[in-house]
Image (cartoon, grey):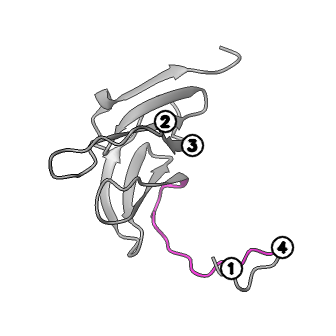
């Protein structure tokens, strides 16, 4: 965004980058600092999670996202105490996600393994 040219009711976009060809991105999450590079995680309507480099906008990883009937609509990194290995690298984090009627949790870094996702129905009408 071009914040210097932005006014109260007019948000000016500085640069647009196309990151998908056929899918529609549904949500974005700044990836926690598990590595030395900065990334952001994008979920799309084709049940995929893509990891993009924050500085170059290049896709680094594509994995199968949670497939519970609807695509992911919101994602959130869960706060937790930092656990590090012998080299001082942070080991793993957890991410919560929401679909249309389910709330779930998965382990980060993303592997695409469907057994690493867990969700439960969280809809007031069901």
Res 51 seen here: yes
How many marks the image carries: the answer is 4
Residue 20 found in image quarter: bottom left
* Sequence-first tag of 4 and 1: 1
**Residue position marked by numbered label 4 in the rendering:** 8
The answer to whether residue 57 is left or right of residue 18 is: left
Task: Residue at the far top: name it.
Answer: 126
Q: Earlier in the sequence, mark 2 or mark 4?
A: 4
Q: Whole-percent x and y of residue 22?
A: 47, 59
User: In the picture shown, does residue 9 fall above or below 48?
Assistant: below
Residue for point 38% across, 63% down: 52
Q: Quadrant of residue 12?
A: bottom right
Q: Of marks 3 and 1, which one's residue comes earlier in the chain? A: 1
Q: Is residue 78 magenta?
A: no
Which residue corresponds to mark 1? 3
Please name the residue that numbered disc 3 is placed on.
74
Picture coordinates of residue 36, whole percent (x, y): 29, 64
Does 65 appear above or below 22? above
Q: Position of residue 84 (x, y in %)?
A: 25, 44
Question: Which quarter of the rendering shows the C terminus?
Answer: top right
In this rendering, the label closer to the viewer, 3 or 1: 1
Give the CA separation, mark 2 to mark 4: 32 Å
Q: CA distance from mark 2 to mark 1?
A: 30 Å
Label 2: which residue? 96
Mark 4 surroundings: few (<14), some (14-19) or many (≥20) residues within 10 A = few
Q: Are marks 2 and 3 in contact (CB under 8 Å)?
A: no
């Amino acid at each position: 965004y071009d914040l210097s040219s932005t006014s109260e009711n007019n948000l000016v976009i500085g640069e647009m980058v196309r990151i998908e060809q056929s899918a529609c991105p549904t949500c974005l999450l700044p990836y926690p600092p598990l590595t030395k590079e900065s990334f952001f995680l994008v979920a799309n309507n084709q049940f995929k999670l893509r990891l993009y480099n924050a500085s170059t906008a290049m896709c680094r990883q594509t994995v199968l996202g949670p497939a519970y009937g609807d695509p992911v609509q919101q994602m959130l990194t869960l706060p937790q105490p930092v656990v590090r290995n012998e080299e001082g690298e942070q080991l793993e984090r957890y991410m919560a996600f929401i679909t249309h009627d389910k709330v779930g949790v998965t382990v980060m870094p993303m592997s695409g393994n469907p057994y690493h996702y867990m969700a439960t129905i969280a809809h007031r009408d069901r």
